[in-house]
Image (cartoon, grey):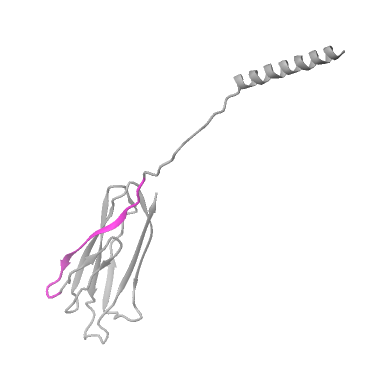
Amino acid sequence: MKNRSKNIVIILLVIISIMAIGYATFATQLTINGTAKIIGEWDVKITNIEAKSVSDGCNAGTPTFTNESVTFNAELEKPGDFVTYEITIENAGTIDAVLSNVIFKEDVENGTPAINYTTTKLAESLPAGQETSFTVTVNYEEYVEETPEIKTKTIIGIIEYEQE
């Protein structure tokens, strides 16, 4: 009976060994490696400001710009005088942009009503690699009959583009 028990244990060990070898033969470990890279670039910026139209006797100053802002200081002499600035915005990136918000606010509390600002409409979309421009005109209202006490008025503009 001892031999028989030994034989059964040996047979079971052989069967288990065969099963382990069979499992190892048919079992495969799969490995997946991946990398993602962002290749799109967002680069919407101001690239120029230029005085395009200046009435006689006015001084358009030397307008300046950075990628995100423009500054100008127009000097108007008499009622009816004006200066028009053209501002260029470029999409130097690879992602199309759409106009999401435009705000132009004149400082009416601290500024003279004799000065008025107007702007042309901005492009609703700005495809990658393209540029657009708009104008800001500052004028000394014609209806003014005497020099106002307050002689300045500031405008602040915010233009927001977002990815399409």
Residue 144, percent from left and from top: 23, 81
Which residue appears at 37% of the width and 52% of the height?
Answer: 98
Q: Nearer the viewer, residue 102 or 163?
A: 163
Residue 72, percent from left and from top: 23, 70
Q: Nearer the viewer, residue 116 or 10?
A: 10
Residue 41, percent from left and from top: 35, 48
Which residue appears at 28% of the width and 68% of the height?
Answer: 118
Q: Residue furthest front?
A: 2
Left or right? Give the position of 64 relative to 5: left
Q: Residue furthest right?
A: 1
Specify the quadrant of the image occupied by residue 1. Answer: top right
Up-down relation of residue 42 to residue 32 (above or below): below
Which residue appears at 83% of the width and 15% of the height?
Answer: 5
Q: Nearer the viewer, residue 135 or 64?
A: 64
Up-down relation of residue 162 to residue 156 (above or below): above
Q: Residue furthest left?
A: 56
Up-down relation of residue 51 to residue 90 (above or below): below
Which residue appears at 52% of the width and 31% of the height?
Answer: 31
Specify the quadrant of the image occupied by residue 3. Answer: top right
Residue 57, percent from left and from top: 12, 75
Q: Which residue range is magenta in the image?
A: 40-58
Specify the quadrant of the image occupied by residue 69. Answer: bottom left
How many numbered marks appear? 0
Q: Nearer the viewer, residue 2 or 86?
A: 2
Up-down relation of residue 78 to residue 84 (above or below): below
Left or right? Give the position of 120 relative to 15: left
